[in-house]
Image: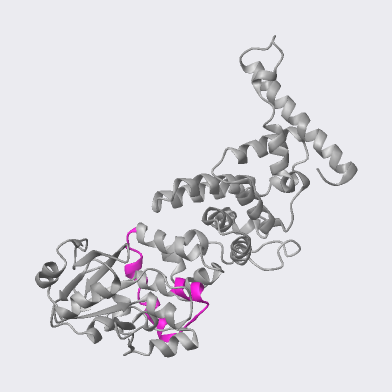
Amino acid sequence: MTENEFVNRVRTAGARVFIVGGWVRDFLRQMPAHDKDYMVAGIDEEKFQQVFPKASRVGKAFPVYLVEIDGHHAEVAFARKEEKQGAGYRGFVVEYGREVTLEEDLYRRDTTINSMAMELPSGEIFDFYGGRHDVEQGIIRPVSHHFAEDPVRALRAARQAAEFNFTLAEETKTAMKACQEELAGEPAERLLQELKRALMTERPSRFFRALQATGLLDVTFPELAKLIGKTQPEAFHPEGDAFEHTMLVVDTVAAETDSLLARFCGLVHDLGKGETPAEMLPHHYGHEVRGQDVLRKWNQRMTLPKKWLQGGLLVIEQHMRAPRLTKAGKITELLLKVNSSPLTMAEFQAVIRADHHSLPFYLEQAPAILARMQQVNGSQAPNALTGAAIGDWVRSQQVKVYQALKHRNQGDKKL
């Protein structure tokens, strides 16, 4: 059915229908809006099922129905109130039904910019808590004391600040700090989901800095918090400690690529510096080895996507070594290793370039070098060779391919 048909059915049943949340916020920001979330008020669940018999219920704690609108399965929720009676995000008692008002529903939402509703079909916007003003001023502000009742809202506020380049109001920071104890016990999947969204913002560092400023980085991503205060040689890292360097790298990678994997690898490339003994500072000898251990422990605490773990381990292992390789055999080995990893060469290049500000010849020209290396295969080996000797011959020929291309580059400065 069309949206107009959906709205007409709801209104004919004596109820009201609204678009709520992020769609309204983005509409006011004059930015592309994402999927619409609908909310109905003045109707009970039994009546709704009669009006929309084909709708499927997906909500557990409270009813949310999937209704096909304009060719998409849209979420339709009922106006509801919540009361916190237990711990964590499951500790809510929810009240919904015909008597719950729009104002009551919006009051339980997290930030003012997400607490507005547009009624259909009129298009009238209801803004009881100053959301329009905060959108115009670029401010993240809690609607009420309910903000701190779901601790992951603190991460959402930090992520929204990064996503929209908005400022956290002082009362938001206070509310975020109040989430510290409960946030430590939240399911890792909820933290991971916010991490993914934060990494896809224009400048992911804003998210981590917001957590740092509110004392939440230690309880959410302690591996990153340990980088704070880990000094580095000023000649190589004038930006400051290992945390500042990491923030610079992840933002630089984000400016170059939309790849979530590359951005995560940029974030974790120097994790080992957080474990550098104080007496070794400002040097970080062996942080490539320590960093792999840190990432594996992070994965035990918060199961990471498999590609994140594999790609991150590779970057941690190779990020210092890659720009310094000179031997053709080692270079060939690394190119082939990256090529067989979850990382594309462009993703690997983005992280190394962000970390070192430039790339050596073999990495700059890696796609062309690999393309020619891959033209070598075992069927071309001398007939006398068998078994492992064929693989050794292929590798030797690939090394020669690289050597020839490097020699040519030294002559014409290009492949």
- In this rendering, the count of numbered labels is 0
Q: Nearer the viewer, residue 68 or 66?
A: 68
Q: Nearer the viewer, residue 51 or 147?
A: 51
Say if 109 sits above or below 348 in the image: below
- Say left or right for 168 vs 286: left
Q: Residue at x 68, y 68 (%)?
A: 239
Asked whether residue 149 appears in the rendered view, the answer is yes
Q: Where's residue 256, x and y in %? A: 63, 61
Chain part drawn in magenta: 158-187
Q: Quadrant of the C terminus?
A: top right
What residue is rendered at 32% in x and 66% in y?
Answer: 70
Query: In the image, what residue occupies the spot 27% across and 67% down?
Result: 75
Rendered-image quadrant of the N terminus = bottom left
**Residue 300 falls left or right of residue 9:** right
The answer to which of 138 and 48 lies nearer the viewer is 48
Q: Position of residue 344 (x, y in %)?
A: 59, 46
- In percent of width and height, residue 207 lies at 50, 70
Most common SS among magenta residues: helix
Q: Is residue 163 magenta?
A: yes
Q: Nearer the viewer, residue 120 or 142?
A: 120
Task: Report if residue 172 lies within the magenta region.
Answer: yes
One can see residue 275 in this view: no
Q: In the rendered view, would you say 181 is above or below 103?
A: above
Residue 174: % across, % down: 40, 82
- Indicate whether 85 appears above or below 126: above
Above or below — where is 106 with respect to 390?
A: below
